[in-house]
Amino acid sequence: MTPNNKRNIRLFLLGALLGLAAFLCLYGVSALDVTNDTFLRGGYIEQDVQQHYAGWLFYRQSPISLPLCETDHLNWPDGTSIAFTDSIPLFAAFFRLLSPLLPETFQYFGLYTALCFALQGGFAALLVGLFTRSDLAALLGAVPFVFSPILLERAFRHTSLAAHFLILAALYYYVSGMRQSRFAFKGLFAVNALAIAIHPYFVPMTYAITFALVAGYSWRNRRLLRPAAFLAANLAATACVGWLFGVFSSTGSGAGGAGNEYGYFSMNLNALWNPTSRGVVWSLFLPVQNQTGGNYDGFNYLGLGVLLGAAVVAVWGLWVLRARLLTLARRHGWLLFVCACLTAFAVSHVVTANGATLFRIPLPQALVELATTLRSSGRLFWPVYYLIMLAAVAGLMRLCGALRFKHAGVAALACLCVVQLVDLSPALAQKAASLREYSPIETDLVTGTTPALSTTTDFFETVSRRYDTLIALDPLTQTGMELALYAADEGMNSTDTSVVARYDEVAAEARRTGFIDEVLSGEMRSDCLYVTERPEAFLQLADAAAEQGAWCGALYAREGESESEPALYVIAPGLDGYSHELAVTYSEDFPLRIADYSDDYWFDGVLSLNLADIGREADENKVVLFYDTPLARCRLTPGAAILCAGQRYPILDVDDSDEGWLMVTLDTADARPLAGKDLVIQ
C-alpha cells in the first residue's frame, strides 16, 4: 500500500468520525434506536417522514419480487414502488431481506442519516486533503461540509436527500481525475450507479460532475471512444440499478402527485446569503430576507464563514491570480459549463429575487412538463454550492501558503470554522434540542399513529381488523399520512395516492370513479372502509351507502379549546350503531357547510370579490355556495332559512344553473360568518 493510499484511508476514517460526532452532537442517540419510531409517526419537522416510514411498513409486508421495492398494498390494486415514497430503496430492500430477523418495530432512517453524516465527513476530508498535506487542515476544512446547512436542513425532513456525500465523492473523483489526466474510476462508477437507489435527484448532480470530467478529458486529449464508452456503461449500470430498485415502476410513470409545476420550488437569487428555511433561522448575524412561493425548497445558505472566505478568495483571485484565471477557466471549462446549467435550472424560468418575481421566461409547455419531473429545481444547485465551499476552503489554504507563518492555513481555516459555527449556532441549537426533546403534540386516539387526527373518538379502534382495504374517494391531502400509517399497522391495503410522489393519475381517477359507481349501484364492498375529506364526495354516496347497511358519518377533530372541525368522512359497511360525541352520524339532520371554494369572485364560498367585473355588486356577501348533493338539494330547495350560531339567515333564492353547484341568496348584509361552520336548515 502506497503512502498516499494510507493517508487517504486515514483521512477518510478521521473524517467519518468527525461526521459521526457531528450527528451525535446534533441528534443524540435516540434515532439510532431501531425500535424508536415515535419521531417518524409524529411527523418530526413535517409530514414527509411519515410518508417515508409508511412506504417501508407497506413494503415490509409485501412479498419479495423483482424489481425490488414494489408493494401492492399501497396504491392498491395497481401497487407502487416505494422509490415514490422516498423510503430509500437501497436500505428498504436490504432490510426487507432481513425482515424475519428484525424486531416487530424497526426503522432504519436514523442509521441511514448517521451513515450519511459519516460519509459526508469522510469524503469531505478526502476532497480537502487533495489541496493540503496537513491532516489537521484537511479535517478543519471538512467541518463546514459536515455542518453544511443544506445537509442539516434535509436530515430527518427529506431523509433520503441527506446523501450529500454522493456529490462530494463525485467532486473528489473529478479533482483526482483532472490531476491524473484520468476519467475512469471504479468509485465514481459506483457513486453514479448507487445514487439512483438512494434518491433520483442525486443522479443529475453526480452525472453533471462526471460529464464535466469525461468531456474535459476528451476535449484535452482529443479522444472520444473510451470516455464515451465509460459514460455509456455507467448510464446503463445506473438504469439497471434503477430498474432493480423499482425506480422505473410503471405505476409511477404518470404525472399524478407532481403538484406544483417547475418554477415554483426554485432557487431565489438571494439564496446563498438568505438564512431562512421552513421553521429555522440559520444565522446569528445576517438578517432573514424575503422569498416567494416555494423558494424555501431552494434553500442554499452558505453560512457567514464560508461567505467571507469565498469573498476573500474571490478578491485575491481577481487581484493576484488574474493572469491565471483564463487558464483555469479553460482547464475547467466543462465544469463551469455544467455549473452554469445546474444554476440556470435551479433558478428556473421564473426568476425571483427577495420577495419579487423579476421575470418569467416563456417556455413550451412540453418542456415545462418535462422539467417538472425534477420540479424542486432549487436542489440542483447543490454541486455548485459545494464547489463554492471547496473554493473558499482550498483558496484560503492557497492564499495563506505564501505567508511565512508555517501554520497560517490551519489558522485561517480555524477562523473560518469558528465564524461558520457561531453564525449557524441558532439553527444548530434548535437541531440539537428538537429531536432529543421530541414528543408528539398529543396522543392520537383516532388512528393510534399521529396527532393530526387527534380527537377523542375511538372509531378506528372500533373498526380495527374489520376491513381489508382503505378506499380513499379522493387524495387525502390532510389525513393521508396518518391513515397510511394506520392502514399499514392494520395490515390493510390502501388506495390513497397522497402518500405516493408519482402515480398514474388517469388510472387512479378511474379506480375512484369505479368505487363510487359500485356504491351508487348497490354493490358496495363489505371488506372495504371508504374515507374522504370532501363533504360533497361523502354526501353524494351517503344515502346509497346507508341503504346498504353502512354506518356513514363525519369524524371531528378538536384542537385545544377551539371549535371542533370535521377531519374525515367515513362509510363503514356493516358497522351498526356507532356513536361518539365527536362523530356525527349521517341522517336527515346532518349538518351542511358552504363549499370551501375560492376564485376570482368567491372567497371561502361567499360571493365577495371583483363583483363589478360581472355586474353583481348588489350581491356582495349575500350569496353562498353549496355543492349540489342530494342532501343539500333536498334541504335547501324547500328551506326557509339557515341557522348558525344563534343567527337566522332567510333564504331568498336557490340557483342550480351551474352544474354541480347550488348558489343560495340570503337576506343578510354579510354571510361571511357562515364560512367553515356547521349549518342547520330551517
Image (cartoon, grey):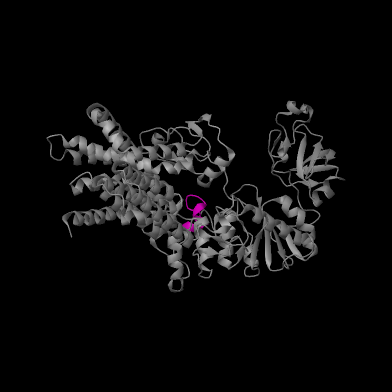
Name the spot of residue 434 as percent of width and height, x first. Answer: 42, 50
**For the view shown, which residue lies furthest in the bottom direction?**
100
Name the spot of residue 639 as percent of width and height, x first. Answer: 85, 45
At x 53%, y 31%, the residue is 361
- Nearest the eye: 566 or 213: 213
State how many labels appear: 0
- Specify whether residue 27 is in view: no
Could you say which quadrant of the image residue 316 lies in? top left
- Nearest the eye: 471 or 362: 362
Name the spot of residue 528 as percent of width and height, x first. Answer: 68, 65
At x 47%, y 61%, the residue is 37
Q: Is residue 11 shown left or right of residue 387?
A: left
Image quadrant in which the N terminus is located: bottom left
Q: Is residue 517 shown left or right of residue 322?
A: right
Q: Is residue 334 shown left or right of residue 365?
A: left
Could you say which quadrant of the image residue 233 lies in? bottom left
**For the view shown, which residue lies furthest in the right direction?**
638
Magenta segment boundaries in residue numbering: 39-51
- The relative height of residue 612 versus residue 120 in the rendered view (above or below) is above
- The relative height of residue 373 versus residue 102 in the rendered view (above or below) is above
At x 78%, y 28%, the residue is 616
- Nearest the eye: 388 or 150: 388
- Specify whether residue 79 is in view: yes
At x 70%, y 31%, the residue is 609
- Nearest the eye: 400 or 371: 371
Name the spot of residue 203 as percent of width and height, x first. Answer: 43, 50
